[in-house]
Image: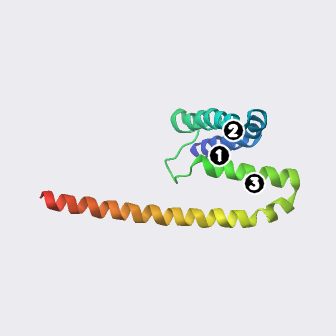
Amino acid sequence: MKHLGTILGAAIAGIFVMSVWGAFVQAYGIAGGWFAGLIIIGTMWYLNHYVGIHNNEGAWVDMALGIGVAGFMRDVFMKGGQAAIESLPTLAVVLLGGIAGGIAAVKLEQYLADKNSEKEEEMA
């Protein structure tokens, strides 16, 4: 049941972002984008993380993955398989960015752990 909640929470967030955000931006410009971000992401984050639709007890996956998959598949369903092929360069760059971010996070955690252990040694 937890996995179903995770899928539903991420899918609902993706559907709202892909269907409502653009309409707010077209109607109200930048202010509409900020408002949509606050309302959509804020509400879905609250539902997914505090109410418990989206359970992160197993593998940690954020709403961004669900939003990205929803956007990718929306274009595939609306425009056909050619949309998937055209998006491959963007997906490759996003994947490289994720890998770089993961490596940077590990290095930062290692640095902070080393720094904390040095402080503990000095205090002892």
Front tag of 2 and 3: 2
* Circle 1 residues within 10 Å: few <14, some 14–19, many ≥20: some
Q: Are marks 2 and 3 in contact (CB under 8 Å)?
A: no
Q: Where is residue 6 in the image (x, y as percent from the top left)?
A: 60, 45
Task: Look at the image and tell me in which quarter the C terminus lies.
Answer: bottom left
Q: Earlier in the sequence, mark 2 or mark 1?
A: 1
Q: What element carries label 3?
A: helix
Q: In this view, does 29 lie above or below 66?
A: above
- Judging by the rendered image, the residue that carries numbered circle 3 is 72
In this view, the residue in front, 29 or 15, is 29
Q: Position of residue 84 (x, y in %)?
A: 80, 61
**Quarter location, residue 27:** top right
The number of numbered discs placed on residues in the rendered structure image is 3
Check disc 3 and give the amino acid type. Phe
- Judging by the rendered image, the residue that carries numbered circle 2 is 30
The answer for how far apart the CA atoms under marks 1 and 3 are is 16 Å
Front tag of 1 and 3: 3
In this view, the residue in front, 24 or 102, is 24
Check disc 1 and give the amino acid type. Ile
The answer for how far apart the CA atoms under marks 2 and 3 are is 23 Å
Check disc 2 and give the amino acid type. Ile
Left or right position of 2 against 111: right
At a point 51% along the width and 51% down the height, the residue shown is 58
Q: Is mark 2 on a helix, strand or loop?
A: helix
Q: Which mark is residue 7?
A: 1
At a point 60% along the width and 46% down the height, the residue shown is 63
